[in-house]
């Protein structure tokens, strides 16, 4: 099965979490532990990491986008 996964950096997927095929709910229950999706080998980490947002900047961006999409509700 081919699935497109949006990632903040370019690279190659080197492993996928096959456990999710039978237990997809793990993504929501433990996203930073057992619910990981894939391991990525970055192609240009040193260059691309400079373009990544800080956690605070990403939160602000996501929050503003959510407000825009919901009409500020």
Image: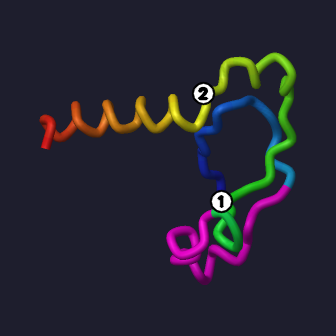
| Residue where numbered disc 2 is placed | 53
Task: Locate residue 73: give its quadrant.
Answer: top left
Position of 10 compared to 30: left or right? right
Q: Residue at x 32, y 32 (%)?
A: 65
Position of residue 62 measured from the top left corner of the image (x, y, whole percent): 40, 36
Residue 22: in magenta span = yes
24 left or right, relative to 65:
right
Residue at 86 percent of width and 28 percent of height = 43
Residue denoted by label 1: 1
What separation in Å lies between label 1 and label 2 (alpha carbons)?
31 Å
Q: Which residues are magenta?
A: 15-31
- Crowding around mark 1 (Cα neighbors within 10 Å: few <14, some 14 to 19, many 20+) is few
Q: Nearer the viewer, residue 47 or 63?
A: 63
Please tell me which of labels 1 and 2 falls first in the chain: 1
Q: Tell me the colour scheme of the image.
A: rainbow
Residue 38 falls inside the magenta stretch? no
- When the figure is inspected, residue 5 is found, relative to residue 47, above or below; the finding is below
Give the image location of residue 37, x and y in percent: 67, 60
């Amino acid at each position: 099965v081919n699935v497109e996964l949006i990632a903040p950096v370019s690279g190659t997927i080197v492993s996928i979490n096959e456990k999710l095929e039978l237990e997809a709910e793990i993504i929501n229950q433990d996203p930073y532990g057992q619910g990981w999706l894939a391991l990525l080998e970055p192609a240009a980490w040193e260059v691309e990491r400079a373009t990544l947002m800080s956690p605070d900047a990403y939160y602000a961006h996501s929050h503003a986008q959510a407000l825009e999409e919901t009409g500020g509700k």
